[in-house]
Amino acid sequence: MRSIPAWWRADRTVARGWWVVLDVVVAWASAGIAIGGAGSPASLGHGPVPERVAVVVWFASLAGRRVAPVGALWAGAAATVAVVAAGEPVTNLSLASALPLVVLARTRPPAAAAALAAVPVATVLIALAGRPGFALACTVHAASAAVGLATRLRLQRAEQRRRAAAELRAEQLLADERSRMARELHDAVGHAVTVMVTHAGAARLCLPDGPPDVRTALERIERVGRDAMTDLDRVLGLLQPAPPLAQALRALLADLPPHLSPTLQLPAEVDHLTTEQSETVRRIVQESLTNTLKHSTATATTVRLTTTPHATRLTVTVTDNGSPVPQPAPRPAPRTPPRGLASMRHRVTALGGTLTAGPDPDAEGWRVEVQLPCR
């Protein structure tokens, strides 16, 4: 749909019919005394034809100033100038150009209103120069513009307050919904993880003289389960922010099974990353290590973080020396990439980075490489 031209856009108060009725009454009274002497005003019934036309235009401009304020202003100004040029007295200070100016100043930005009103208002004032009441006419036009501008500012402030209140209500509703989802997720997942940790601890206590490998595995299950609960609480906003990135990466590598030997290489600039960047790096490393454990026979993995000079770009590389775990039966090719890889790519793309994952071209195994801008 095409936009309505600026000269035709109506005032929103047109929807309030009594304002238009009041304009019609004012227009009728103003047009009746607009031209000629007090004892013999021009009207549709008598007077020269140009003056009769001016009365009609005068009435239309005042009655329709809320429907088309720009057109009403120009039409009223033209009628006033035409009457003055004919040598007739103007007895009502040219309300036909002053009253539409109020609506124009209220409904348009100040610069646009000034550009649209400059020519007709200046023409009317020039035409009235030297006549009785010229100073009062200037005052009336200036007051009309000031009233319109003040009303516009008041309406803008009211609209800003309304929008702020609406945004506050929307934010409150969103916060309530997030809190509800956080409670549901915490209760559901938290219960399952707590039961898992409890059973692992009970099994460890029931095997005081059991094989050391079994006890070590049960202790690791307990520790990883507790870490998962802490991570869940932090993600749901129930605890303090995550620990520093270096500490979090060391904790991830410490929880790996004994058969997977890890190596961690960190630059000094890793502590200067933003919270969102640190969280993304931690999730990338976590998902890469999980894929190594699930899908390969690797016995060693390396996590390396490097930065360019002046720390403008960060490279995260996770490699292993394993080969894919043989599948018992062929599976159809998935239509979409694995969820873990898709999640990593989404996180990296959101920060303006790139991710590549595939067989390591320089050695046997798998390689995940992420490029992130540091600032």
Image: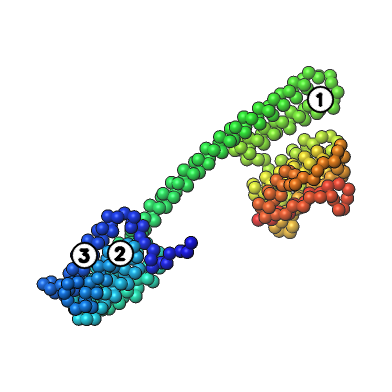
Residue 267 vs 152, above or below: the answer is above
Front position in the image: 80 or 240? 80
Front position in the image: 235 or 23? 23
How far apart, in angstroms, are the residues tagged by discs 1 and 3?
Answer: 99 Å
Front position in the image: 69 or 48? 48
Which mark is drawn over residue 15?
none
Name the residue carrying label 2: 64
Q: Where residue 308 sits: x, y (%)? A: 74, 57
Residue 330 falls left or right of residue 2 = right
Report the residue at 67% width, 45% height from top.
Answer: 279
Report the residue at 76% width, 29% height from top.
Answer: 221
Closer mark to the observer between disc 1 and disc 2: 2
**Quick one: SS at disc 2?**
loop
Residue 67 vs 161, above or below: the answer is below
Name the residue carrying label 3: 28
Name the residue carrying label 1: 215
Residue 133 falls left or right of residue 267 = left
Disc 2 + disc 3, Cβ < 8 Å: no
How many marks do you count on the picture? Answer: 3
Give the mark nearest the N terminus, 1 or 3. 3
Report the residue at 81% width, 50% height from top.
Answer: 358
Q: Where residue 245 sits: x, y (%)? A: 70, 44
User: Label 2 is placed on what type of residue?
Assistant: Gly
